[in-house]
Amino acid sequence: MKSTPQLELININKRFGSAVTADNFSLTIEQGEFFTFLGPSGSGKSTILRMVAGLEQPDSGSIRYGGRDLAGVPPWKRDLGMMFQQYALFPHMTVAQNVAYGLKAHRMPTDAQRTRVKQMLELIGMSGKADKNATLLSGGEQQRVALARALAPAPDMLLLDEPLSALDEKIRREMQLELKHIQRRTGTTFFYVTHDQEEALTMSDRVAVLNGGRCVQCDAPERIFTRPRTRFVAHFFRGCN
Ligand code: ADP
Ligand code: MG
């Protein structure tokens, strides 16, 4: 028996003037998947993710999440977590205060907040830095805290738009493993965006290769790599070595 997909995009269209960011785009993501959009700059990855988040509206088509149509549902009522490259921490707050931020908004009682923050800091291996000011952290640490903050309210799905692209190579590779590990451990669905082929291929259960607001190929990473369906996909991958 097939369960309802967690997220369904159905015939989404979206353009900004002549830039087509979603061209009759359809997609389903299952509960617990690590699903990745991979594509060159300008292919529509961020815009589609932002429509799921409710930060942009489709020109036409529908988005269903947990079987519910999201049309007209504001971002804060979508039960989605978000983490972006630029999603900076609140600089005047400590690590623990940053992680607690979303819990306060959900009106969680203070004791429960404290327990949850402790759990999240353990999850990201930063228990010793709870009271440190956010601005004193390294780039990798800041993104770890941003991850903990996004996961603290236990969203069913986390949207991640190039969360590691500002980090240098070594830290980025470490964080890839850590993100994957945390995704598995928490069972959260990850809807991930990257233009880094290696990142997509090593982390994901499925990858959708985007070009011009269309999905060129959506498959398990090894199939995308070994059986590219179009010349665009093949060339895009050749470019990564
Ligand atoms: P990606 O994340 O794959 O790099 P984007 O979704 O950010 O792609 O952008 C796709 C195209 O849509 C680009 O040509 C971009 O310039 C255009 N675009 C995105 N957002 C806007 C906007 N708010 N206003 C005008 N054009 C936009
Ligand atoms: Mg983008």
Image (spheres, rainbow, N blue to C red):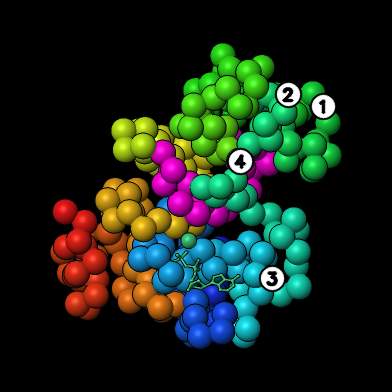
Q: Quadrant for residue 88, please give it.
A: top right
Question: Contact, CB < 8 Å: mark 1 with mark 2?
Answer: yes
- In this figure, which residue is indicated by the disc labeled 1? 110
- In this figure, which residue is indicated by the disc labeled 4? 88
Label 4 to label 2: alpha-carbon separation:
22 Å
Determine whether 202 is above or below 49 in the image: above
Query: Which circle's residue, 3 or 2, is located before the other in the chain?
Result: 3
Residue stretch rendered in magenta on the structure: 148-167
Determine whether 183 is above or below 63 in the image: above
The residue located at (75%, 67%) in the rendering is 73
Q: Quadrant for residue 173, please give it.
A: top left
- In this figure, which residue is indicated by the disc labeled 2? 114
- Residue 99, given in percent of the width and then of the height, sits at 66, 32
Residue type at the position of mark 2: Arg
- Residue 129, given in percent of the width and then of the height, sits at 58, 17
From where the camera sits, is residue 33 visible? no
Query: Which circle's residue, 1 or 3, is located before the other in the chain?
Result: 3
Residue type at the position of mark 4: Ala
